[in-house]
Amino acid sequence: MLLEAVKLAQHAIRRNALRSFLTILGVVIGVGAVIAMVTVGKGATAKVSADLAKLGSNLLFVRPGQFGPGRATTDAKPFNVRDVEALRAQLSGIRAVAPVAQKSVKVIFGSRNHTTLVTGSENEYFVTQDWLLTTGRQFLDSELRGGRAACIIGQTMRKELFGPLDPVGQHVRVGAVSCEVIGLLDSKGQSSTGADQDDIVLMPLRTFQRRVAGNTDVGSIYVSANDDVDTGKVQADIERLLRERRHISPGEEDDFSVRDMKLLVQTTVGTTTVLTGLLGAVAAVSLLVGGIGIMNIMLVSVTERTREIGIRLAIGAVEGEVLSQFLIEAVALSSFGGLVGIVAANALALGVTRLIDVPYLFNPGMNVLSFVFSGLIGVVFGYFPARRAAQLDPIEALRYE
């Protein structure tokens, strides 16, 4: 009986090929939109997470002044080396503390020049930023203490100034300072804000302060906590210590800010996840529209085939057989549309992710769920027309013109 119902449903679909195609198209668009939106959204979330992770592990940014809507201040006094030493001496569970001072400077090599962000720091900067060297070495203690003009450059600087040449051992002019290139940083690419992290020149902090910046200011401090340490506790300890050092009375607002990168990552990922869910929900509406289209076409099919149904019922077919025939037809249309939609969606998602440079993450669970849901759409929206066909009065159906 079931095999016969399947054959009849297949015959009906082939007999009205164009109408069946248009019916399937609604499901294809619905399934395709849901899978494509969710896949691209998850890829974007993964890229944001990876970009933020490149900034460092268990990292806290400490900056003078307050930053945020309605509370931005830029007149707070900068940090100094003594603040950095106090953090190193009094904080527990700390892997590295790196002072950072920065200035935009023109860097020259031969006939080439490039304006970039020059950073003054120490070797702990590499720890806080999880940054490795491709070639060369880190700063020597004598370079850090004595203020010798040595520098380490990023991949963008290498390309802009040296092209295919090995930069290690060469001398560049950073502003008015002649500086030996002693190392080349590994590539990190763009950050989540679009900034080129490889466009950098790194110098010993004291050299930078004396010969480039002309002051002893420390613009920010990067603090990297151990993996087994709660960064929330570290943040509280930093805030307590800096309030003491900056003589901030109880009840007064901090004139500095401490940002936990872990919380920033969680907030950003949570936001992109919510947006992905909203996009998927909006796309799911089109799948429901496709189901309504199936019900509409099946109702038309029942009306057109009233006499056929009457003849089947008159020669002995029971209601269950007629119900199965039309229900199988609806499920076949929706399921085939689901399969085509899955293929189209993954092809579209692959193209879009490559276009916007985010990872393509195939989600088997989402694809299986979409196929099952497309079948359920056929059952839900096909049941009413199938039930209507099964309950036709054979005599009235035979009289139908």
Image (tube, rainbow, N blue to C red):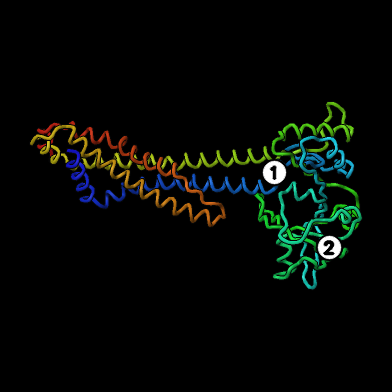
Other residues around mark 1 within 10 Å, as few (<14) / some (14–19) / many (≥20): some
User: On the picture, is 148 further left or further right than 278?
Assistant: right
Q: Which residue is mark 2?
A: 174
**Residue occupying the point 89% across, 32% down:** 247
Q: Residue 176 or 132: which is nearer the viewer?
A: 132
On the image, the x and y values in percent for residue 82 come to 89, 42
**Residue occupying the point 61% across, 47% down:** 48
Q: Residue 372 or 225: which is nearer the viewer?
A: 225
Q: Which quarter of the picture shows residue 66? A: top right
Residue type beneath disc 2 = Val
Give the quarter of the figure containing the C terminus: top left
Element assignment for label 2: strand
Other residues around mark 2 within 10 Å, as few (<14) / some (14–19) / many (≥20): many
Q: CA distance from mark 2 to mark 1?
A: 30 Å
Q: Is residue 291 above or below residue 360?
A: above
Q: Which residue is mark 1?
A: 57
User: On the picture, is 66 further left or further right than 287?
Assistant: right
Q: Is residue 318 above or below residue 282?
A: above
On the image, the x and y values in percent for residue 360 come to 51, 51
On the image, the x and y values in percent for residue 138 come to 79, 56
